[in-house]
Image (tube, coloured by chain):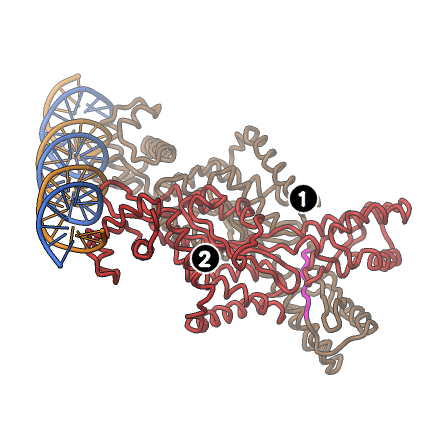
Chain colours: A brown, B red, C blue, D orange
DNA sequence: ATTAGCACTCTTTTTGATTGAGTGCTAACA
DNA sequence: TGTTAGCACTCAATCAAAAAGAGTGCTAAT
């Protein structure tokens, strides 16, 4: 059977109404709301076909129809195709986004020393605006380079190492050394470090590590320090994930079921499972990916849809922004919001 | 009316059974489980009295009895009194706590550069062991002193300031300055900073701020730097709150009601409202406080009990550990756990 | 090809009856 | 005087049957 234009319009009407209400939608409703001027009976016939084709289902014999994952998928793809050569509505939404960014900037300005806090703020604002749960991951990327290293003594046998990476990501650590070390030696170490280590990425550092040690004899101190630096840099490289608005899921009855909500919030809370959204690089449509229902890699999200966008900041930081909501989420709005956020995020950071 | 020993025993039995089952408990049950060898009829009479006194209520005419906040309160107080001069069971629980600490230590060792992460780990472990939601607040205290300041140049017009406070709390910030600054000047500034600023607390710093500026003429650069330092230090001083195991509340049906759960998780998520537990200093019984039902300062926790303990680490950090659960939580276990954690926490940190 | 009409299905809501847990009270008892 | 057995009573919870309502599929007419 073929999906002609009329069928598609009916499918679209079903989905849109379902997005709004969350209730199964019947033929009479479609007859009324759509501009097809067909009777409910005709619609019924078409709907029977659509069901046969797998785009919609009845929860039970005498209920309206509900879109399947396949149905959503078709709908989402069509939106994307449409977006591709119609750059419409942009202006309408622009002002709103402008304000969003304004808010973020304000929060951001207050404590821009901690990347994580900024992400947190963005995640919250985003959650607030969309009414869905959000996640943002950041990773500085494995090829992020060391820009600057500074060693100082804070106590008799305790040293502080501060490492600045490209993009001004800062890591530091206080650590204990086995023997007292003179100010002069610290100076020497600093010189030495900044000539050998600067400009190296984590991987390069690892490679060079033994070479450097060999070159400088078996200096106990140097080895200790280098190891600490390596550890610290490698940690900085971790993928960090923050979430926002997790309780938004209670706004959708189909997700408020105690068991579903629990699992969902649990995965959002410990963030572990969310990495699967980050791993899969996004080569397709402008980096925006859709996971509808069973398509999500996380089992607690079977009843959800997840939309992710990847971003790359001018400082080399890359990451993923994700929006988690019910399958009947407002895909158009989400895509638009994501696109905007992504574009402006870079702007926001480069300005600093 | 007077609360004689028998009445108290019955009340205790009611509460204990209710803690276990979460269901209203009737006179027959008490007759069976208690060792009073009284008939249900007698128990009934006593229970009528207890109800009159306000310790228990019937949810409806023909249901068993449920403890009131007042009833819980009496019970909790009696446990504490009992604890005071019986140091029993300790050994039994000791091993378990030992292991808890072991776990935390392990997590802790891996990335001890970030206090917040440690707290997070502790909160999670605690939540895991108790099956309740947990919160931990840290604040370095307003009298925490600056130990060490280090300024360095990372780009043409960007400076990095690293501040180490007592207890090796480190803050740093990269900031842009209006004019290029020579290496020599940075050196000078560093000298200057470490002689004037070291040893000051946030409050003292604020006081001295203008004095220092006046003394050094209207050096644009100095003023900028000092302000940044002040801002950064003040931020470091913020109360930080982490939570753990928020989804544990789903383990208790009376809290799983969608509306209650939503409100609860929301407050736990944005942490803002939790500060009220920190503010009220805890002068009484070893610093452990109980908030039963309506007693909690947070309205979303009306159906919960909250138990908090305050702690103070050897490095001056103070804070509050809180456990949030249903009113029928296992108060004895919680008290014990809190006491243990508190004692060991200090040990854990001073060892580092 | 479209539509009106109708029988049919299945969920949801309503209603009423039944059950069962638990109480309060009274009267008997030690 | 304190304790207990017994009984009538209350009320939530459970269940079944009935009614209502939404929506469908099919047939026959347009």
**Mark pair 2, 1: CA separation:** 31 Å
Picture quarter with the C terminus of chain B: bottom right
Where on the picture, by quarter, is residue B54? top left
Question: Taking C23 as reference, is B12 above or below it?
Answer: below
Residues A25 and B118: in front is: B118
Q: Can residue A168 be seen at all in this image of the molecule?
A: yes
Element class at badge 2 = helix
Q: Is residue B218 left or right of residue A128?
A: right
Chain of residue at mark 2 = A
Element class at badge 1 = helix
Stretch in magenta: A169-175
Residues B75 and B176: in front is: B75
Both labels 2 and 1 in a single chain? yes
> What residue does disc 1 label?
A110
Question: Taking B70 as reference, is A25 above or below it?
Answer: above
> What residue does disc 2 label?
A273
Q: Position of residue D9 (x, y in %)?
A: 15, 37
Q: Can residue A278 be seen at all in this image of the molecule?
A: no
- In reply to whether residue B176 is colored magenta, the answer given is no
Residues A234 and B93: in front is: B93
Label 2 vs 1, first from the N-terminus: 1
């Amino acid at each position: 059977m073929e999906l002609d234009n009329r069928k598609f319009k009916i499918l679209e009407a079903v989905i849109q109404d379902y997005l709004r209400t969350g209730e199964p939608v019947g033929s009479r409703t479609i007859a009324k709301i759509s501009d097809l001027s067909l009777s409910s009976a005709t619609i019924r016939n078409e709907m029977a076909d659509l069901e046969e084709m797998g785009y919609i289902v009845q929860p039970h014999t005498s209920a309206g129809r509900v879109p399947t994952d396949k149905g959503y998928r078709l709908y989402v793809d069509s939106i994307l195709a449409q977006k591709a050569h119609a750059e419409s509505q942009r202006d309408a939404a622009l002002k709103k986004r402008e304000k969003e960014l304004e808010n973020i900037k304000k929060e951001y300005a207050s404590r821009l020393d901690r990347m994580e806090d900024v992400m947190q703020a963005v995640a919250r604002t985003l959650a607030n605006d969309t009414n869905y749960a959000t996640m943002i991951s950041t990773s500085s990327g494995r090829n992020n380079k060391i820009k600057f290293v500074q060693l100082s003594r804070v106590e008799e046998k305790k040293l502080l190492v501060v490492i600045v990476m490209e993009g001004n990501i800062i890591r530091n650590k206080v650590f204990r050394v086995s023997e007292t070390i003179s100010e002069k030696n610290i100076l020497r170490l600093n010189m030495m470090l900044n000539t050998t280590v600067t400009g190296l990425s984590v991987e390069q550092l690892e490679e060079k590590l033994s070479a450097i040690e060999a070159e400088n004899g078996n200096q106990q101190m140097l080895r200790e320090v280098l190891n600490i630096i390596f550890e610290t840099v490698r940690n900085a490289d971790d993928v960090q994930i923050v979430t926002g608005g997790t309780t938004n899921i209670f706004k959708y009855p189909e997700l408020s079921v105690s068991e579903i909500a629990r699992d969902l919030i649990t995965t959002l809370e410990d963030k572990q499972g969310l990495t699967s959204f980050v791993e899969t690089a996004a080569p397709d449509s402008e980096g925006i990916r859709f996971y509808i229902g069973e398509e999500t890699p996380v089992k607690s999200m079977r009843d959800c849809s997840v939309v992710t966008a990847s971003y790359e900041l001018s400082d080399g930081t890359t990451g993923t922004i994700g929006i988690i909501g019910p399958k009947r989420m407002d895909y158009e709005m989400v895509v638009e919001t994501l696109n905007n956020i992504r574009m402006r995020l870079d702007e926001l950071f480069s300005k600093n």
